[in-house]
């Protein structure tokens, strides 16, 4: 699957909480380190390195070049153990030469003979004292090193031109810089974690993913509604509710599947339990009946039947009663409050659901219902746990596969399609369930917005605007 800029923007939009959390954590860590860090003060002294004994311009030029070469070596000597040892002895310090050497740094500007010594310390006065001490010791050390054997005068000398000054403010920690770096690091870590989590997350979150996995069109998307637990049926919703409109859009799109057939049989199933297949089947049946179709909803899930509970019908008599020959089909079908919708509930739970569903009696029931109704919807068990759904799909015109947004994985959808194809069946359409309210995958999303009659507008008001 190709990834473009829109995918990354979607990841940033959906995972912004993770990114913000990482940024806040790194900012907090940076702030804690800044608060707990000991302030460090820096004091610097500058020295001029020159040659002695030059009598003409040529010698002076050679001496200058010689000084430039020496400055690079002096910068390295200043941070060594010997200078630190001499300073400790000279100032009678109670710290080790190694500890003092770690406080000393030296630098020189390119093509100059100016050498800058910098010493850091928690105490600004002590930093100044140490910088002056290092400069003093180094002047004597250079004189010692650069005096040829048998001579009294050094060829090169170092002169302090700028004594160390007392620092007025610490050079570290730097709160603004540390917080800024913490923020940048946190955002980068958060973005990386978000992309990694998105990469490892194989759940279906877009219609494009479904289009690549299922060889069938997406008939519609049902937007998530937190009230669906208490009011699962669209008959309990306002006419212009987005979820109700989503099923009307689904009803319209379903008509384009085999449009020449006048009697159709569809199985409504899913990959695993918990994806909303039963409520989807019931609401689709209600929407079809509302549209003028003669519909029968068959509770083909003989293991965990729920249709009778949702529609408040008798569940003890139904499909299993007909299949074992204790009741004729016409007597087992129950009418509902919705005109045009009949329901064949599951009946008693049998010990052998798969055997009953693949029997010739089940084929006869489906054939009889096909003749009597415009559309037959069969609520079937999930495809992956049991074979019941695939067996029913093989006897129908195809399966309507319900996929739950953010829960069903790509592997589960792939396996579900393979289960159908293994028995000679196929998904004829996909229903994307529980999509976010603001998702562009919600085909029915928002259609009801703005189309409801305004409460202040009366049909008898001649001045009222016409609403289309």
Image (cartoon, grey):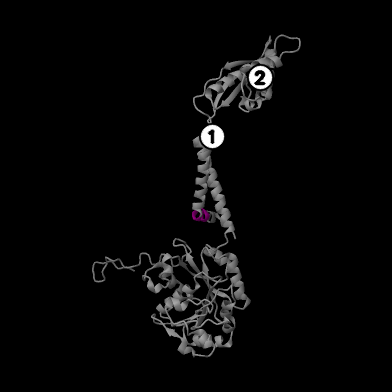
Report if residue 10 lies within the magenta region. yes
Q: State which tag comes first along the sequence, 2 or 1.
A: 1
Residue ID at (49%, 74%):
278
**Does residue 143 belong to the magenta stretch?**
no
Nearer to me, 4 or 379 = 379
Residue 253 appears anywhere in the view: no
Percent across and percent down for residue 11 are: 52, 55
Residue linked to disc 1 = 37
The residue indicated by pointer 2 is 86
Locate the C terminus and report the quarter of the image it occupies: bottom left
- Residue 53 x, y percent position in the rendering: 69, 10
Q: Quadrant of residue 215?
A: bottom right
Where 6 falls versus 301 (above or below)?
A: above
Image x and y of residue 378, in percent: 51, 79
> SS for tag 1?
loop
Q: Which mark is residue 442?
A: none
Please say whether residue 406 is visible from this viewpoint. yes
Magenta range? 9-14
Q: Quadrant of the N terminus?
A: bottom right
- Mark 2 and mark 1: span between their CA atoms? 30 Å
Residue 202 to residue 17: above or below: below
Residue, far front:
94
Q: Main secondary structure of the magenta part?
A: helix
Q: Position of residue 388 (x, y in %)?
A: 57, 78
């Amino acid at each position: 699957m190709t990834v473009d800029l829109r995918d990354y923007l979607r990841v940033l939009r959906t995972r912004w909480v993770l990114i913000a959390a990482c940024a806040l954590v790194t900012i907090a860590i940076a702030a804690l380190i800044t608060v707990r860090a000991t302030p460090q003060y820096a004091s610097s002294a500058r020295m001029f390195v020159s040659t002695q004994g030059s009598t003409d311009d040529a010698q002076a030029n050679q001496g200058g070049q010689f000084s430039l070469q020496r400055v690079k070596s002096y910068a390295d000597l200043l941070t060594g153990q010997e200078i630190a040892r001499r300073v400790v002895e000279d100032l009678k310090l109670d710290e080790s030469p190694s500890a003092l050497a770690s406080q000393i740094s030296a630098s020189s500007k390119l093509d100059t003979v100016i050498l800058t010594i910098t010493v850091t310390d928690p105490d600004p006065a002590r930093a100044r004292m140490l910088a002056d001490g290092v400069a003093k010791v180094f002047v004597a050390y250079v004189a010692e090193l650069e005096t040829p054997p048998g001579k009294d005068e050094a060829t090169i000398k170092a002169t302090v031109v700028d004594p160390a000054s007392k620092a007025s403010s610490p050079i570290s920690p730097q709160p603004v810089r540390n917080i800024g770096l913490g923020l940048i690091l946190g955002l980068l870590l958060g973005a990386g974690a978000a992309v990694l989590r998105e990469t490892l997350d194989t759940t279906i979150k877009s219609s494009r993913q479904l289009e690549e996995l299922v060889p069938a069109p997406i008939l519609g998307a049902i937007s998530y509604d937190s009230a669906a637990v208490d009011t699962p049926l669209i008959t309990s919703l306002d006419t212009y509710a987005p979820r109700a409109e989503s099923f009307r859009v689904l009803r319209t799109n379903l008509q384009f599947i085999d449009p020449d057939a006048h009697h159709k049989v569809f199985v409504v199933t899913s990959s695993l339990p918990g994806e909303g297949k039963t409520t989807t089947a019931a609401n689709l049946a209600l929407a079809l009946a509302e549209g003028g179709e003669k519909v029968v909803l068959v509770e083909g899930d003989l293991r965990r039947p729920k249709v009778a509970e949702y529609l408040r019908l008798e569940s003890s008599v139904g499909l299993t009663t007909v299949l074992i020959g204790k009741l004729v089909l016409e007597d087992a079908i129950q009418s509902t409050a919705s005109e045009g919708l009949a329901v064949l509930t599951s009946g008693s739970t049998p010990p052998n659901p798969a055997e009953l569903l693949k029997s010739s009696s089940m084929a006869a029931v489906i054939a009889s219902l096909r003749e009597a109704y415009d559309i037959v919807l069969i609520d079937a068990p999930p495809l992956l746990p049991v074979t019941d759904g695939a067996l029913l799909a093989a006897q129908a015109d195809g399966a309507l596969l319900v996929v739950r947004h953010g829960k069903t994985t790509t592997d589960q959808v792939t396996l579900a399609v393979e289960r159908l194809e293994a028995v000679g069946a196929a998904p004829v359409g996909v229903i994307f369930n529980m999509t976010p309210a603001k998702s562009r995958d919600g085909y029915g999303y928002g259609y009801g917005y703005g189309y409801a009659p305004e409460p202040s507008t009366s049909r008898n008001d001649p001045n009222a605007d016409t609403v289309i």
